[in-house]
Amino acid sequence: MNAIWKLLTFPAMLINAHTHHYTEGHISVLNFYPHQDTPKVNPKQTLLSCGIHPWYLKSLDNNDALARLTELCSQKMIHAIGECGLDKNTDDLSLQKSTFIRQIELSEKYKLPLIVHSVRCHHLVQEIRKQTHSRCPWIFHGFTGSFEMADQLIKQNIFISLGSYLLRQPAKAKLLLNKIDLNYVLFETDDSDIDIEEIYNKASLLTGKAQTELEKITELNFKKIFF
């Protein structure tokens, strides 16, 4: 992480807060899962996150996955936990919740940020953050909700990461971006083949702010989370 920290002391760079595809040329947080090999990346540009996704709970041995995740944390092989969380489009919310809480506990123990996946479970995510007394930063990835929901998350020190939503629903995204506290905003590409430059460019158009200004804001937000 020191190499990335030094890189971030130079003029602002594009930061991709959550992606499933390894690319170079900007700073990114690359996601993988416990059943996968640890990706080989350029440590000067890429941080790694690993978590148990609610979609895969039934196809994995949960104990093995948690053991691998714990090992990755203890050996300092990853820089964030996730993506993990809750999804009402997938069965067994009780198992999702217990697995999510186990990963929150790892986040707190190893002082690692948590990248949250949530589908129609925003209020439950907030409730769990409160119940677990979590203090580590969380990144709510792929956010597509309202300003009111974003504001509630921000009040719990949860950062909002925006991606292709800016391109798919620009009118709604514009309303959100122009009301939200940008000191809690990040940008991402998730599993899409969109270039992160396109996301920043769209955010610039929607906010009326220079892209370089947004780069500086997200760089500071990124530092608050990871450094």
Image (cartoon, helix red, strand yellow):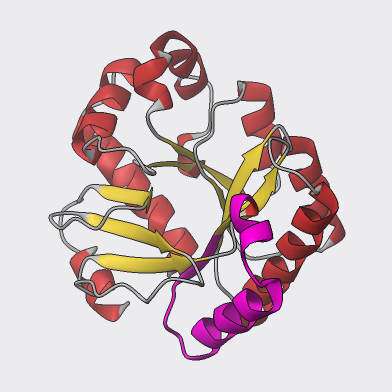
Residue 223 as seen in the image, left or right of residue 137? left
Does residue 68 belong to the magenta stretch? yes
> Which secondary structure is most common in the magenta stretch?
helix
Q: How many marks?
A: 0
User: What x and y, as percent, mark residue 213?
Assistant: 26, 36
Q: Residue furthest left?
A: 25
- Which image quarter: residue 174? top left
Residue 190 as seen in the image, left or right of residue 143? left
Q: Residue furthest top?
A: 171
Q: On the rendered image, what quadrant is the N terminus found in?
A: bottom left
Residue 157 as seen in the image, left or right of residue 219? right
User: What x and y, as percent, mark residue 180?
Assistant: 53, 28
Does residue 115 belong to the magenta stretch? no
User: What x and y, as percent, mark residue 75?
Assistant: 47, 91
- Foreground of the two, 206 or 209: 206
Q: Residue at x 59, y 63 (%)?
A: 52
- Foreground of the two, 55 or 130: 55
Write down the region rendered in magenta: 55-82
Q: Residue at x 44, y 76 (%)?
A: 78
Residue 96 as seen in the image, left or right of residue 68? right
Looking at the picture, does residue 58 appear above or below residue 206? below
Q: Residue at x 49, y 13 (%)?
A: 172
Q: Residue at x 55, y 65 (%)?
A: 51
- Foreground of the two, 177 or 164: 164
Q: On the rendered image, what quadrant is the C terminus found in?
A: bottom left
